[in-house]
Image (tube, grey):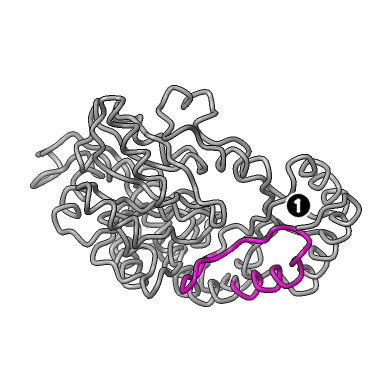
Amino acid sequence: MKIEFIDLKAQREHIGERMDKAILDAVNEGRYIHGPQVREFETKLADFCGAKHAIGCANGTDALGLCLMTLGLRPGDAVICPSFTFAATAEVVAWLGATPVFAEIDEATFNIDPKGLDAALETAAREGLKVKALITVDLFGQPADYEPIEAFCKANDLVLIADSAQGFGGQYRGRVAGSIGDLATTSFFPAKPLGCYGDGGAVLTPHDEYRDVIRSLHVHGKGTDKYDNARIGVNSRLDTLQAAILLEKIAVFGDEIAKRQIVAERYADGLAGVVRTPKVLDDCVSTWAQYVVRVPEDKRDAMIEALKAKSVPTAVYYPKPLHQQTAYKRFPVSGNGLPISERTSRQVIALPMHPYLEESVQDYIIDAVRVVATDLGIAD
């Protein structure tokens, strides 16, 4: 059996005719930069999650960078962020000469733990750093626990940036990821739940002033016209062709999120008591960018190899937290270390996940995991 980890071709088969027309229309129209599809998609993106403003850009990393540029981050400033995440979350802080301060995650959800934020703030103070912002990550599709995080940011005068590269469209107690935070970002990398056919990203915000600055920054700091640069910016535009593709993708995105819930529920039922399945907070909805289970760390490599032998692809997100990686070891770690982040990185395995995962294929995956877990003596 040939199993795709993320089957982009299955989606293409579902919307291929409409997609072909959208792409060809954009090509024939000839407005390849800032064509009308870009603003149309920005409007629909904002409408989908209930954000006031959406600004497309070149990729999800640039989206985070534009947020921090808007805040005027500089050396001596700090940003609290999780370590158990992709490098982009902290990378953008270092771009500007500022300092990421790594905070602990909640073991049940993989997201930054609100209870560890005071320790991160204290660590920054000991380092002589001024914390300006907090970046949360909606890891694997589940929104972070925003209510206590928002209270912490308000109490400490911090800007909340929600990195929703994996979680855009998820729900947190009646709110949709993308509309949460002073600034929110997302990525349209092809493997993301809402992905394009290349690179793309966006910033979302309720604040008019942030919108205005970001619209300037992402086009070289443009002022009243393209030869009046009001600020030092970057070149980070969402291509017209990618916007045309995303217009077709967002039209089916809500339905695909619903389909992902069904896949996740079947995994949870089929793997209960076999491996440690993910937990979603009450009154929340994950987009299930990845379906990540945990196994004993001394069994993980053997499980991966045994599943591979059964043609079940897996992935490890992330095998090493940022604070243990070469480029980030020099940055502060909050409290007495990040044991949960470190332990989790040694236990996680992601199983195939996409909205078009057929029941028969999923049953095969579940059966394979159960057999391998039994053979290895794994029990949750």
Residue 201's x, y, as percent?
39, 52
Residue 315's x, y, as percent?
68, 47
Question: 167 left or right of 182?
Answer: right
| Quadrant of the rendered image containing residue 320 | top right
Q: Amino acid at mark 1?
A: Pro
Question: 308 left or right of 206?
Answer: right
Q: Which residue is mark 1?
A: 313
Depth order, front residue of 198/103: 103
Label 1 element class: loop
Depth order, front residue of 191/320: 320
Question: 132 left or right of 146?
Answer: left
Q: Residue at x 23, y 33 (%)?
A: 130
Residue numbers of the magenta segment:
261-287
Seen as rendered, the residue at the extreme right is: 375
The image quadrant where one finds the C terminus is bottom right
Residue 316's x, y, as percent?
66, 45
Q: Residue at x 41, y 45 (%)?
A: 116
The image quadrant where one finds the N terminus is bottom right
Q: Quick check: is 263 in the magenta stretch? A: yes
Residue 101's x, y, as percent?
38, 34
Q: Residue at x 46, y 64 (%)?
A: 24
Q: Residue at x 45, y 43 (%)?
A: 82
Callout count? 1
